Image (cartoon, coloured by chain):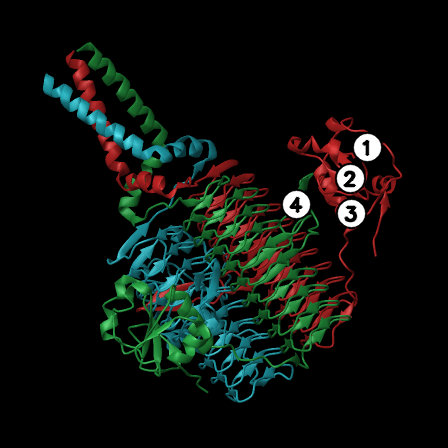
Chain colours: A red, B cyan, C green
Amino acid sequence: MTVSYRLSEIAARLGGRVLGDAEVRISQVSTLEKARPDQISFLTNKKYHAQLASTQAGAVILGEADADATGMPRIISDNPYAYFARVSSLLNSLPEAIPGIHPSAVIGEGAVIDATASIAATAVIGAGATIGAFSVIGAGCYIGDHAVIGSHVRLYPRVVIYHDCVIGDNLIAHSGVVIGADGFGFAMDAGRWIKIPQIGRVVIGHDVEIGANTTIDRGALDDTVIEDGVKLDNQIQIAHNVRIGAHTAIAGCVGIAGSTTIGRYCRIGGSAGILGHLQIADHVEIAAFTLIGKSIREAGSYAAIFPFSKAEDWRKNTVHLRHLDDLAQRIKTLEQELKLLNSQH
Amino acid sequence: MTVSYRLSEIAARLGGRVLGDAEVRISQVSTLEKARPDQISFLTNKKYHAQLASTQAGAVILGEADADATGMPRIISDNPYAYFARVSSLLNSLPEAIPGIHPSAVIGEGAVIDATASIAATAVIGAGATIGAFSVIGAGCYIGDHAVIGSHVRLYPRVVIYHDCVIGDNLIAHSGVVIGADGFGFAMDAGRWIKIPQIGRVVIGHDVEIGANTTIDRGALDDTVIEDGVKLDNQIQIAHNVRIGAHTAIAGCVGIAGSTTIGRYCRIGGSAGILGHLQIADHVEIAAFTLIGKSIREAGSYAAIFPFSKAEDWRKNTVHLRHLDDLAQRIKTLEQELKLLNSQH
Amino acid sequence: MTVSYRLSEIAARLGGRVLGDAEVRISQVSTLEKARPDQISFLTNKKYHAQLASTQAGAVILGEADADATGMPRIISDNPYAYFARVSSLLNSLPEAIPGIHPSAVIGEGAVIDATASIAATAVIGAGATIGAFSVIGAGCYIGDHAVIGSHVRLYPRVVIYHDCVIGDNLIAHSGVVIGADGFGFAMDAGRWIKIPQIGRVVIGHDVEIGANTTIDRGALDDTVIEDGVKLDNQIQIAHNVRIGAHTAIAGCVGIAGSTTIGRYCRIGGSAGILGHLQIADHVEIAAFTLIGKSIREAGSYAAIFPFSKAEDWRKNTVHLRHLDDLAQRIKTLEQELKLLNSQH
């Protein structure tokens, strides 16, 4: 089954101004380069401007500045990329999940599952858990005892949510996500590690997305908190008692150590790390592969990437890093000697 | 249901010296800042000393040096943090798992499951596997053929243990843990990788904890070994034929390459890495984000963190790293020229 | 049950030249150091040459150059390590999976499952999915709607393959692998992230192996592609629209950002990273812990490892990294002043 909309219908639903033939029918999104006549594309990057002339797309989404850059059917929007995202969602709605509980699912005593929710095959719902309206619990998911899951949540297969965690509306969590496992807390005593029970929860706001195999640990005493609109990529590790501010986006493989608080609207690059017990301000950008070892009080971009080079150059240059203090001392000595020499003239 | 104990009862079970009112009832642990009158807290960090005066806690655990720092009900211990861990365990015992096999679990031929063990819904136990006394196999776990699981083991939902692996007593493994997958071993032959069968096992000692989504590969020929008391955080990767010494603790996202041996009582920071075929001595501390590329023969702290800065400063400074050898040569030249100049005076 | 072969039988199957007693029976592979008389070992590293004299192995695989290094039973091969891999495969064939569908598996409408395939307990197969001949779908795996799985594929327990993905023949995927989760794509609009539907697929060629808990995201518009013979270790993250060239091998914990294309026969070390929208040539080697931030057009080895040292040395040296530009300027100044001084003589 293919859905399609006239350009005029799209604008009626999503806003924007139509120029050119408003009757053209659109059934999918694509890139300018690959689009066919029943597809709509977009332009935000000047690099692709030349493709406007050659594209086979049936229509295109443009910013105000480019409104007259082509005569083809087009929608003019303040934010063409976001508009494109909305058109794509319109054309690519997720398959409706069938409400109800699959006979192979196992439901704990006292669990409250909304009649509109869908519990897939082999899912296991703990005692006293709550599943909200229109939420979809994928195959093989596990929801711990007394966990509370909001409405319109979508858990892909094999997500685990431990006991007592609280999940807001519209969460999307991909396969392999683990929410609420024990934080890493031990006390050393006479040569042995004594486990510190992790009695906090994970509390997640609304409109959060969590990528595949990401883990978020429950708090040690207080809760770990993910605020509204946070977007987490795959394979991220969030330790106990971390708080992530609203609308912050974190790329894959990042690790955030315990009790660190991250502000709102931050962007953290892939494989970066943040040590524990730090405060990161709002609107901080952290480059990929960068370890943050102190609190950041000021918005802005921060980096700590070792630049790559051919291995032989890297070896030649890097050997000096172990003697940098010596090099610095030698520069100082040179300056003093030169000063002395100059004074003698 | 809330458990509570008088301070005197706690000391009777766990040791320590009670000062002040020993009859106060304690039902939970908390921080000095947030504790309520039925809760006990602890002080180990001088930074929080001032909170002793203002805390609402019903009691506090203190070291000998602080025994008289307050008149409130208190327990004096040599190791207040470990004592706190024990009190918390007393007050927060895990829910008892019901012994027996859930009807939706699938049990392989010849598996031997202790009558006190608990096999949760949708778990799958392989042929000839052994599950020890009081062990809890969570929902959706998979235990491979002929694997041997000790007693008092707790596997959270969706843990996978491959065939023939051997697990000691008291293991705690969190969701998504994979123990015994094939190590990464291939021989290149005429432009193709030929797989080297991984015929070793994973052998895990007693009292180990493994965090969510951590992976430990089986050995290529010999076994991969995790000794007693090792604590592994989330998202760690342990390659084939690694050996981790007893009571070593490893933070999240660390990767350890094949055939490396790590000593006892080491501490490895988050996202650190250790290359293959190395030996790391006992009592070695490795900083977060540090790659260890050579064996370490001596106890102590090691680091290799690139310090972060504002992106513009980072760019300005980092450009010189690709010319560090040239800078070093120029310093040498300067020294020689200056020596010559000085000799001419 | 133990399989065993005479040396002559092994050579008849796998080629190579037998020297010494061809009747010796071999039932397992091992290292020179640990082999017993019914086991075969190999020598490729001169470091272990001395072990030839002391080994208890019943036979050994040697290169042409070492053909006469011992009088023990031996097979001479151009590539002893690959030969060893093949002998090991012969002696350690995987247990045959029983064809058919376990009664606890859940099969979607219209799924086409070859009669020789094996679907294990609690696996869930989506509507319209295809499972090829002799493929083994492990316990608790999830195959999405309309996914196509080739022949002789082996999915270990708890692998997830999302809807519409296409998997070639002979894939081995270990537990916790997630193929086809949504890529990380959002447009910022008025302070909120708008999700960009990820409508591409993951397409995987033949003879690929994927380690435990590795994730490969589906494409945003076009597909994410893994070509034939690629070998991926554990805990790797492959973002949307990445293409990995044939026979490339990637070690554990690597992250590859969106839309990057990696060539054929590359080797990427553990915990390395590659930023998005880059091109990496064929036959590129990237060291562990190295971030690649620009395209690489030329085959060769590349690195960016910060060398580790004792923590106190690291502190002393590293403090200067934040002043490297200043140091470079001071060297320049020294050079100019010295030139001036020299010119005055």
Q: Which residue is mark 4?
A: C186
Q: Which residue is mark 1?
A: A72
Tell me if label 1 and label 4 are in contact, CB under 8 Å: no
Q: Which residue is mark 2?
A: A57
Q: Chain of mark 1?
A: A
In terms of secondary structure, where does tag 1 sit? loop
Which residue is drawn at the image coordinates 34% and 57% (left, top)?
Answer: B69
Instruction: Please report whichever mark, 3 or 2, sits nearer to the chain's N-terminal start.
Output: 3
Image coordinates of residue B246 in percent, x first then y, are 33, 69
Q: Report the amino acid beneath label 1.
A: Met
Alpha-carbon distance for marks 4 and 2?
A: 22 Å
Alpha-carbon distance for marks 3 and 1?
A: 17 Å
In terms of secondary structure, where does tag 4 sit? strand
* Along the viewing direction, whichever of C247 and B251 lies nearer the viewer: C247
Respond whether the residues carrying marks 4 and 3 are from the same subunit: no
Instruction: Please report whichever mark, 3 or 1, sits nearer to the chain's N-terminal start.
Output: 3
Give the position of the N terminus of chain A as an image quadrant.
bottom right
- Graded by Cα atoms within 10 Å as few (under 14), some (14 to 19) or many (20 or more), the crowding at tag 2 reads many
Respond whether the residues carrying marks 4 and 2 are from the same subunit: no
Q: Chain of mark 4?
A: C
Instruction: Please report whichever mark, 1 or 2, sits nearer to the chain's N-terminal start.
Output: 2
Q: Chain of mark 2?
A: A
Closer to the camera: disc 3 or disc 2? 2
Q: Report the amino acid beneath label 2.
A: Ala
Q: Is residue B302 left or right of residue A221?
A: left
Respond whether the residues carrying marks 1 and 2 are from the same subunit: yes
Tell me if label 1 and label 2 are in contact, CB under 8 Å: yes
Q: Is residue A95 left or right of residue B137?
A: right
Q: Is residue C106 visible?
A: yes
Q: Which residue is mark 3?
A: A28
Closer to the camera: disc 4 or disc 3? 3
